Image: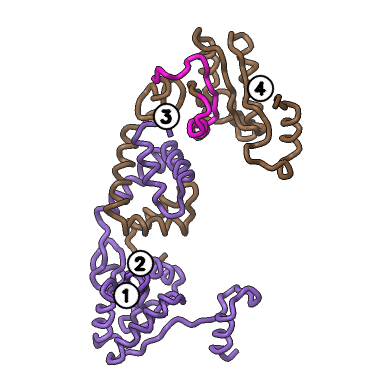
Chain colours: A brown, B purple
Amino acid sequence: MPATAGPEIERLIQLLARLPGLGPRSARRAALHLIKKREQLMSPLTSALETALAKIVICRVCGNIDTQDPCTICTDPRRDPSVIVVVADVADLWALERAGAINARYHVLGGTLSPLDGIGPQDLTIDAVVTRAHEPAVREIILALNATVDGQTTAHYITDLLHNAKVSVTRLAHGVPVGGELDYLDEGTLSAAIRQRTPF
Amino acid sequence: MPATAGPEIERLIQLLARLPGLGPRSARRAALHLIKKREQLMSPLTSALETALAKIVICRVCGNIDTQDPCTICTDPRRDPSVIVVVADVADLWALERAGAINARYHVLGGTLSPLDGIGPQDLTIDAVVTRAHEPAVREIILALNATVDGQTTAHYITDLLHNAKVSVTRLAHGVPVGGELDYLDEGTLSAAIRQRTPF
């Protein structure tokens, strides 16, 4: 764009465009919206970012993102310390927490094994999962990984490492999504749903 | 969400969700992306917002958003001072500049007349358009307003106010969008394109 707005505004647009979900055009709209709502939105957002920058830390126990270390979940006495839910990413942890699926602790791997992308065991916190699985309080490791090739490879890899640990290793059920229509489901999901059928 | 992340992260997500183009779910993804790319994205974005907050001003002449007042466009000696392009919003000004459509000056109304939403002439900078139209250097006012009822009402209102001024008042051409297919166009656009046909 020619010199219509100052370079400061262009820089803001460029940075906003790097957020997932915003393209160059919507970043422009977002910047304009911020500038128009300077008091109500731009100023609070700037402060929130400053606070987050200053306070956010990675939990040394589980890899969760929080403003305290160990994180809120690891230090919560009401959480079941005997179950650890292994997830690939903090986004997955958030998703399970939104669902209120389980009141346990977590372990964030930081990704999944992916030979094609050059991601090996040393790039993830797999060693820490094994260490935690040997703690006396821990009785179950739930592998809550994506039902993709990479996710399942990672699950198998971790299961192999845990064969000496006195824990049961479980994984998420496969089946028909709640609200899902059979007609639209792939064969793999339907076969799994039949194989793992439950009494009515 | 229960207490999985600190309130600072929740606040950041809430504020990001108020940007146009981001919903609650994508705001969560954006926040996570920012936190992961703290050095490369979160920190520069925070600085860009701080700079914008401190520097951005509204041009007292044309209503454009810039970091100087009068704005870059109003003070640019290479711009034709005899033509003023009247737009509803800064986003429209940016769109015309991106297109490189004209090398003139602008006037941002701040919206369009809309009796249903209670927006009358006193809420827009229509008086300033009339004042500027009476400046000796100005010879043409281009009404670059949306081809909607509100946009065209505003255009008619301004045209009426300018009948004493020694300027020609023009508006954008209606017609087939470049790259558009006739089959998909509405009757109004097609009729306008026929009526305003030009020699080949």
The chain carrying label 3 is B
Q: Amino acid at mark 1?
A: His
Residues flagged by tags 1 and 3 on a common chain: yes
Q: Amino acid at mark 2?
A: Thr
Q: Residue at x 27, y 74 (%)?
A: B125
Q: Callout 2 environment at 10 Å: few (<14), some (14 to 19), or many (20+)? A: many
Image quadrant assignment for residue B43: top left
The chain carrying label 4 is A
Q: Which residue is mark 4?
A: A156
Q: Which residue is mark 2?
A: A4
Q: Which residue is mark 3?
A: B4
Q: Residue at x 44, y 36 (%)?
A: B36
- Return the residue nearer the eye: A130 or B182: B182
Q: Amino acid at mark 3?
A: Thr
Distance (Cα) linking label 1 and label 2: 13 Å
The chain carrying label 2 is A
Q: Position of residue A42 (x, y in %)?
A: 31, 51
Whether A75 is drawn above or below B175: the answer is above
Is there CB contact under 8 Å for labels 2 and 3?
A: no
Q: Which residue is mark 1?
A: B107
